[in-house]
Amino acid sequence: MRNVAPEMKPKFGLAPVMNTFTETFGLGRGAAWSAVIMISLVTLSGIFFFFNSAPPKHITITSGPIGSSFHTNAEKYRIILARNHVKVTVLTSRGSLENIQRLGDPASKVDVGFVQSSPTNGLELGRLFSLGSISYQPLMVFYHGTTTVEVLSALAGRRLAVGPAGSGTRALASTLLASNGIVAGSNATFLDLEAADAAKGLLEGTVDAVFLMGDSASGSVMRQLLRSPEIRLLSFNQADAYSRRFRYLNKLDLPKGSIDFARNLPAQDVYLVGPTVELVARDYLHPALSDLLLEAAQEVHGNATVLQRRGEFPAPLEHELRISDDALRYYKSGKSFFYKHLPFWLASLASRVVVVFLPLVVVLIPALRLIPTIYRWRIKLRLFRWYRALLRLERELSVRSPQERRSQLQRLDHIEAAVHKLKVPASFADQFYGLRGHIDYVRSQLMGTAPPP
């Protein structure tokens, strides 16, 4: 069998790979290992961020009681987001106030909720933001009697169903009644009844007036009271004053006949007041989910109703909570390029590739080009150091006393020993062997055997 030189035998493993790497890029083993470790760490960090930055496949929405407009809309969102393979869990609640409490509580497992734009009574909102307002939420006050009630102060001394605890209805009703000098236990009786029980009590005469809003009352309960001949809907003749005193309130017009043309309900124009409903999320909400939620909001709330024009909502109306940067970007320019033209899962993949790996390539390429340059300069400086020592020694060759020549030979031996200890990559072999040849040339000059120039 023909003998093969050891250096010609095929080798496998990490060492041959590293040797090839060092010879190709002109790096020493230490520099090569540093480059490999840096590339590995950066790549692993990119891979970790790539998977960690994927939008979640599940979110939880806190809504309202079953049958309320909040709960009904949350179910519509669930169906729309399911088209993009995002699962939505809808949690019932007592209304807007409980929703904002859940969102502000880090221990509560909710991501998004419907909240009326009203004072939050000192709740911690630092980790919350709004995706914008999605609808008006009128306060509807129904009362029993033949005498027309034109102002809230006329309800003093009566039994008032102001909504269950935790609802936005109760919070707003209590605020407006207090502004009219009506306080629970003092000159009125406040009843904490659910919407259906409150409506039943009003029809039976055990309740004098009912305050209803969509966060805690169903549309069927409101329609039942609107169609009852003995029940009246209070028209806020002071609506302009309320909307100026309480900046989160809006004056809303319910036109004559808008509920039922045939029965002419209501029989005259009715003025209402109410806040807008905001879509509130925690600050960790993924930008892709923010876009999906706003897209769902346009589908659910974008049409015209008796209280709003087509396309009026969703809208970036800022109240207590700031509008998120992602939401502002969506209102300004719509969905990003990938999400406009690709399915959600593919757009998510493509956008993460661009966000994660493109910057890595942009950073790594200059870094990898810089490492060999720095290393080559380092090797050259090490070689130049002994070239300088050799040049100084050569300039002194004119001195030929035996003692000085011995000293020069010792210095040359020191230079030669130091050069032999140098470790340089194969790409610097020509310079390394050139230095050794020059050492031999200076030695021959010292010994007087150098050929003439």
Image (cartoon, rainbow, N blue to C red):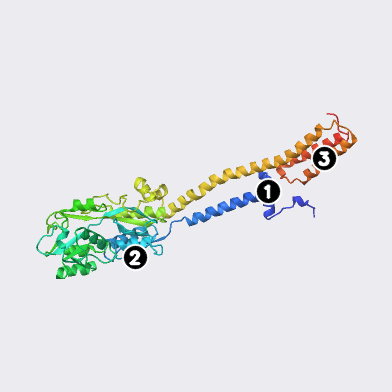
Residue 116 percent location from the top left of the image? 29, 57
Q: Amino acid at mark 3?
A: Arg
The tag on residue 20 is: 1
Residue 223 lies left or right of residue 316; in this view the side is left
Q: Is residue 430 visible?
A: no
Outermost right residue: 402
Outermost top residue: 453
Q: What secondary structure is found at the residue carrying circle 3?
A: helix
Q: Amino acid at mark 2?
A: Leu
Mark 3 vs mark 2, foreground winner is 3
In the rendered image, which quarter contains the N terminus?
bottom right
Out of 165 and 50, give the one closest to the viewer.
165
Q: Along the polypeptide, which appears first: circle 1 or circle 3?
A: 1
Q: Residue at x 24, y 64 (%)?
A: 218
The residue to which callout 3 is attached is 411
Q: Residue at x 26, y 64 (%)?
A: 216
- Alpha carbons under labels 1 and 3: distance apart: 36 Å
Q: Along the polypeptide, which appears first: circle 3 or circle 2?
A: 2
Residue 112 lies left or right of residue 394; in this view the side is left
Residue 166 percent location from the top left of the image? 29, 65
Q: What secondary structure is found at the residue carrying circle 2?
A: strand
